């Protein structure tokens, strides 16, 4: 008789890894047969995990079609198994997986579309945060301001791509009725994904200066470095106004 | 940032002995606008493990109107891996914030070697497995500081090693840990059909005082070769033989809070409410007969 742990490991290998074994000798046939009964669990598990990926990556699914998506999902599940009982954290590595997934190699934009969808998913479930205290910020001595670091709102993400991924996302929404065409050579995009006061998610296409400023701060760069990079990226960038807006709107929520 | 417990008119009080429905994201707005006259609502705990955003915001607003039950699917209590402390901590925080009257999990395992299958996998019904489940349920109740309910699973296989009938295993677990039983009448029916045991035996073995919640749901029949297997899919109305078994259960256990469980292929909210009415009618009738 197998100890419980060995039984569970054996079940996992046989049923979920699909490894050839005689595990079905532990299962009562009862007409249907042990192997067939074990397959019910395999199907349920794959279905459930695939469903979780479909829920997070509906645009990627629409782009490649249901059949291909299921095939990709089955491979993903084998390479990047779920590590949590919370299905909402499953699928984080799907963009990276797609990057090296040979059958999808032609769709060069696909990994970035998936990155956008994962970022959207993170923003959807992220914490709220009170606005930055302007009065306290104003009191920071001038000589200290350069060294300040800023915390980005937990429900904000920055993303850039060489592909028009925002347009691809938009035309693949259920309620999109306009022209569904996209020109893949129309150029890339720099995005801020953020929540409004109603917790609805919006995408903002940013100019180079603004993107540099925010992404440097998000990467824990100090204010001086962020400003330098922003002005280098876009000499015409109105940094003071833009910075002020992001403080007021709550993109930047704390400083230290 | 610690959120205050939701200010509910109802307080942390108990779930009424009436029918309730599962609260799904697709119905958030309808529940707030229509205020369906159901006794209570149940959610999957893991759907509220995020740090913020719409799910928690909606749950807070809805919790102010309805008693709540938290039903977990991912704690993997029966796994031989150590209990997932992070998962427990999130569940504990959810309990603190939303003050559910009932908290439940499954007689099942869903992970081993750190890998999760996010599905309810079958335990062998052996003395070793029973001792293990007893120890785990005790740990969970200790960590949460409260009683949990354990739900009987739907099963598609029986292990050669199993020596204890499932109903006896579940009762023994409850008696040794003080946990309650969430009796899923649909799962009893599905498992009874799949394994050829008598559903009535299940009902009659479980003592009245440990059943604190009942689940009702729909199943799907899968034709396989020259046989069939029932799968607990939670995607359709409750089947007539399950209503009949529920009637028996109410006659035996009395008025128990009953949940209509519908997780996928969701219909309009009114369909769930209609199923709840049907359960309420059976609760009423049986109570009237007993009076």
Image: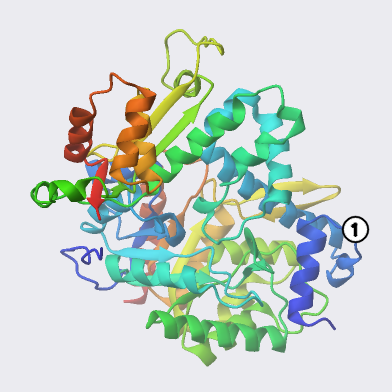
Judge left or right: residue B75 versus residue B5: right
Determine whether the residue tagged by mark 1 lies in a helix, strand or loop: loop
| Residue farthest toward the front in the current orientation of the protein | A143
Q: Chain of mark 1?
A: A
**Circle 1: is it few (<14), some (14-19), or many (20+) Cα within 10 Å?**
few
Front-lying residue, B27 or A165: A165
User: Which residue lies under the disc numbered 1?
Assistant: A20
In the image, residue A233 lies at what x, y percent? 38, 25
Residue at left offset 30%, top offset 55%: B38
What's the image's color scheme?
A: rainbow
Residue at left offset 24%, top offset 63%: B3
In the image, residue A54 lies at what x, y percent? 57, 38
Judge left or right: residue A85 versus residue B258: right
Residue at left offset 65%, top offset 26%: A65
Whether residue B19 is situated above or below residue A92 in the rendered picture: below
Residue A142 in view (yes/no):
yes
In the image, residue B246 lies at what x, y percent? 50, 65
Judge left or right: residue B146 versus residue B16: right
Residue at left offset 18%, top offset 63%: B8
Q: Looking at the rendering, in which quadrant would you find the N terminus of chain A?
A: bottom right
Residue B269 in view (yes/no):
no
Front-lying residue, A154 or A160: A160
Whether residue B213 is situated above or below residue A162 in the rendered picture: below
Q: Looking at the rendering, in which quadrant would you find the C terminus of chain A?
A: bottom left
Front-lying residue, B257 or A210: A210
The quarter of the displayed image where residue B44 is located: bottom left
In the image, residue A212 lies at what x, y percent? 37, 32
How many numbered circles are shown? 1
Judge left or right: residue A70 versus residue A213: right
């Amino acid at each position: 008789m197998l100890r419980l742990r060995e039984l569970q490991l054996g079940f996992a290998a046989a049923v979920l890894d699909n490894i050839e074994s005689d595990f079905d000798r532990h299962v009562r046939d009862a007409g249907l047969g042990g192997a067939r009964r074990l397959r019910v669990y395999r199907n349920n598990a794959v279905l459930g995990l695939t469903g979780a990926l479909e829920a997070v990556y509906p645009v990627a699914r629409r782009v490649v079609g249901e059949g291909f998506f299921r095939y990709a999902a089955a491979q993903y599940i084998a390479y990047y198994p779920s590590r949590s009982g919370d299905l909402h954290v499953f699928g984080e590595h799907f963009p990276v997986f797609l990057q090296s997934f040979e059958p999808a190699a032609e769709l060069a934009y696909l990994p970035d579309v998936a990155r956008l969808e994962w970022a959207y998913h993170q923003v959807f479930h992220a914490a709220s945060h009170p606005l930055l205290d302007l009065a306290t910020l104003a009191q920071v001595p001038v000589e200290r301001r350069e060294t300040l670091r800023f915390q980005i709102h937990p429900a904000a993400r920055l993303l850039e791509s060489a592909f028009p991924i925002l347009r691809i996302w938009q035309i693949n929404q259920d309620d999109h009725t306009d022209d569904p065409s996209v020109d893949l050579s129309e150029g890339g995009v720099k995005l801020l994904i953020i929540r409004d006061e109603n917790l609805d998610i919006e995408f903002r296409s940013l100019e180079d200066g603004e993107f540099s400023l925010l992404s440097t701060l998000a990467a824990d760069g100090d204010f001086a470095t962020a400003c330098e990079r922003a002005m280098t990226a876009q000499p015409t960038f109105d940094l003071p106004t833009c910075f002020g807006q992001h403080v007021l709107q709550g993109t930047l929520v704390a400083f230290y | 940032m610690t959120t205050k417990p939701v200010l509910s008119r109802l307080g942390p009080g108990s779930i009424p002995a009436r029918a309730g429905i599962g609260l799904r994201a697709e119905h958030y707005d309808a529940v707030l606008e229509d205020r369906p006259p159901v006794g209570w609502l149940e959610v999957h705990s893991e759907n509220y493990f995020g740090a913020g955003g719409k799910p928690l915001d909606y749950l807070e607003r809805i919790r102010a109107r309805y008693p709540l039950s938290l039903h977990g699917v991912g704690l993997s209590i029966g796994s031989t891996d150590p209990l997932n402390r992070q998962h427990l901590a999130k569940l504990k925080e959810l309990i603190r914030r939303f003050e559910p009257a009932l908290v439940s999990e499954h007689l099942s395992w869903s992970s081993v070697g750190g890998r999760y299958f996010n599905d309810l996998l079958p335990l062998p019904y052996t003395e070793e497995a029973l001792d293990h489940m007893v120890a785990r349920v005790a740990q969970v109740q200790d960590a949460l500081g409260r009683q949990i309910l354990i739900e009987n699973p739907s099963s598609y296989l029986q292990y050669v090693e199993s020596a204890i009938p499932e109903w006896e295993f579940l009762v023994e677990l409850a008696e040794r840990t003080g946990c309650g039983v969430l009796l899923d009448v649909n799962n009893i029916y599905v498992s009874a059909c799949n394994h050829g045991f008598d559903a009535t035996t299940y009902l009659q073995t479980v003592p009245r005082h440990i059943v604190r919640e009942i689940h009702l749901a729909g199943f799907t029949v899968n034709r396989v070769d020259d046989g069939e297997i029932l799968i607990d899919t939670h995607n359709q109305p409750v089947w007539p033989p399950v209503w009949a078994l529920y009637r028996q259960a109410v006659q035996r256990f009395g008025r128990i809070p009953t949940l209509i469980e519908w997780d996928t292929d969701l219909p309009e909210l009114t369909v769930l409410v209609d199923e709840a009415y049907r359960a309420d009618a059976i609760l009423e009738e049986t109570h009237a007969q007993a009076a």
